[in-house]
Amino acid sequence: MGRAPGVPLLVCAFRGSPQSPRDVAAHVGAAWGEAPCPVLVVDRHGALVRLNRAARSLLPRACDGDRLDGIAPAWLSDAHRHVVEGTPGAPSGPLTGAIDERVFEAHPSPSTDGDVVWWLVDDTDRRRAEQALHHAQERSGVLAEASSRLLSTLNVPRCMEETAAMAAEHLAEAAVLVAPPHGRRHTLTYARRGGPVSQVTWKIDPFSVHGLSEALQGFPPVPARWIDPHGIPDWLLPEGFTEPPGSVIIAPLPGHGVPAGALVLLRSGTERTFSDGEEAFARLFAARAGAALSAARLYTEQAAITATLMRELLPPTLERVHGVEYAAGYRPAKDHERVGGDFYDFHPGADPDQETVVVLGDVAGKGLDAAVLTGKIRNTLHALLPLAADHQQVLTLLNGALLTSHHARFATLVLASVRRQGGHVRARLTSAGHLPPLIVRTNGEVEQVPTRGTLVGALPAVSAQTVEATLAPGETCLLYTDGITEARGGPLGDEFFGEARLRRALAECAGMPAEAVVERVQMLAAQWLGGGRHDDMAVLAISAPKNGPLSVVGGEPSQIRRSR
Amino acid sequence: MTGYFPAEFSVEITEHPASCTVRIAGELDYDTSDELVEAVVGHLRGRPHTGEVRLDFTGLTWIDSSGLSALLMIHRATSALGAALRLDNRPGFLDHRLRLTDILDHLTGPVTPAGLSAPGEDGDQSRAGAR
């Protein structure tokens, strides 16, 4: 600064000063030269009288006597003119403006001789802090919006559209979301600021873009400055993005354990490049989007699995076969699950002389575990059908197939082998730890079939007694699960429907067709429940038709004659 | 109509020399059966010389098929130790379920390596008989 060491500051400041320095010094005080903020003394004509040390370092080109408008920005020299001329309408608040990279508030104090002392208070850091706070608020707003918009949908394509649209709106000029491959094809979602969002599925080579294949594999992101914007292939540019890209960010979308894709942010060469702060924020945004996307993806996969399982596990439709009426009804514990722990199955005999096998049962537990075990039991029983002449053997083999050391999840079930003989229906019934079937006679009497046996799937050995029952025309045998008798409801809300009520209800069903019995029992149980929670409920009815021909399904005249 | 609130489920294990008593209160069902199995199996893990485990059902208010599964799992654990399982103070509904599913003799029978049980033992404590 041209000041010899040890020379007093004020002497330095006086150098070359033509005006009355003593006067000013007296006015501002002797300490001003050491003041930490820049101070300039300017006369009424706009010439610099003196500067303190801080002012010299701020305006290194300035010398005493220079014109203020020659060395300081216009906002300051204009303000000086206003102060000197006393122009009305001067701004009331502090004057602010930039000098070089920094921002100052300028406070004038006019002295009696017409000089003005300008105190410049450096405001840059407060400005920066305010700006940073504003940015942070804006960004947390964007993140909050991202979370609420993305988490409100569990639809994967919609989630990808929202992500790309928000990224284009808040982070870049354009954004492309590259989904993980499906085979070798990737779904690409393009968004351009102010433009529509579009989605295509293409076979692309992620290795052709530096950083993209890494991001898709969930590796740490490649810094934006390493990515050559000129190397971005055309398929990564949204329609309408005509300028060559100037800067690119490729951010991985981290999912739950597996990557949810990559987000490519683009700015054209005419725009400014991404700052470090923007890059960091982009990764933050990508983390939110990735979490939402993978939640949606997991949900979609789970829904697909459930749908597939359900198709396999849904109970079959029962109908009249070989002169015997069958009907069944099922109500799962939760209406949205459709598949639960109760099950029934139906295997019509190949011809009227063959027995038709029906099974109704209940698996311990709930949900998917129960549904899977149900499927296993139904499949195993299907395979064991040729052995159905001996229920005990079927149950022993089934028990062996289900035994596992992992859990003691078991099933209880009733096996029924049914055949029409003359006008009557003969049924061999075996309970494996299940509620014994009830038979309603034509006179309204209700009997319990005295079959009993061991549950299957938990004990090393099982035994069961098979009971043969005969149904006269109009009589029905009812198989049911404890969801019916243990339906909690009634006037007080916590009473069981119970076997006694079921028997009374059945007594009123004497002579009714199978379908009507099932509907009646289901209706009464549902009424009993009111709106209360309930377990799975399954009912299956086997009825000997009251009168009429043996069968209309595949019935031949000889069979009808024989049956009468 | 009053709402239906199930009684609070609780498991309380009292240790005696070479045996233990497990008091079970409340509903033993899908939601609570894992808790019972973990408590009993966890207790037995540190005590390989337990000769008898008594489950006391005085406070039991309800049991479902998952509850029965839990009893079967506990039986596996006691059998593995060579310990006898006793089911004390069984309410009628429990007895009914054990007889319906034909597992009472299995659960309370003498301990054999194969887990097969001799019938007829421990039937005296039932309050509700088999049909």
Image (cartoon, helix red, strand yellow):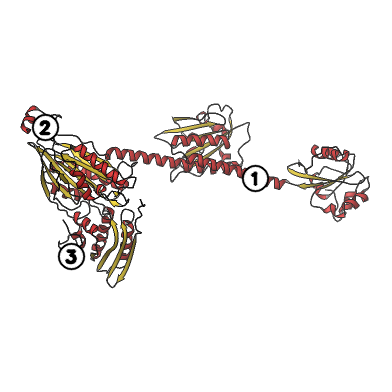
Whether A402 is drawn above or below A327: the answer is: below
The residue that label 2 is drawn on is A550
Residue A212, position in %: x, y?
49, 37
Q: State left or right for residue A41 relative to residue B121.
A: right
The residue that label 1 is drawn on is A132
Q: Residues within 10 Å of mark 2 (few under 14, many from 20)?
A: many
Q: Secondary structure at mark 1?
A: helix
The residue lying furthest to the bottom in this view is: B17
| Residue drawn at point x = 84 percent, y = 52 percent | A32
Taking depth in this image into account, of A81 and A259 the one nearest to the observer is: A81
Determine the CA span between mark 3 and mark 1.
81 Å
The residue that label 3 is drawn on is B124
Disc 1: host chain: A
Amino acid type for the residue under numbered disc 3? Asp
Determine the CA span between mark 3 and mark 2.
51 Å
Taking depth in this image into account, of A172 and A358 the one nearest to the observer is: A358
Q: State left or right for residue B50 relative to residue A209.
A: left
Rendered image quadrant of residue A248: top right
Label number found at residue A294? none
Amino acid type for the residue under numbered disc 1? Ala
Disc 3: host chain: B
Residue A141, position in %: x, y?
57, 42
| Residue drawn at point x = 32 percent, y = 45 percent | A530
Residue A413, position in %: x, y?
20, 47
Q: Secondary structure at mark 2?
A: loop
Taking depth in this image into account, of A513 and A316 the one nearest to the observer is: A513
Q: Is residue A471 visible?
A: yes
Disc 2: host chain: A
Q: State left or right for residue A108 relative to residue A202.
A: right
Are the numbered discs 2 and 1 placed on the same chain, yes or no? yes
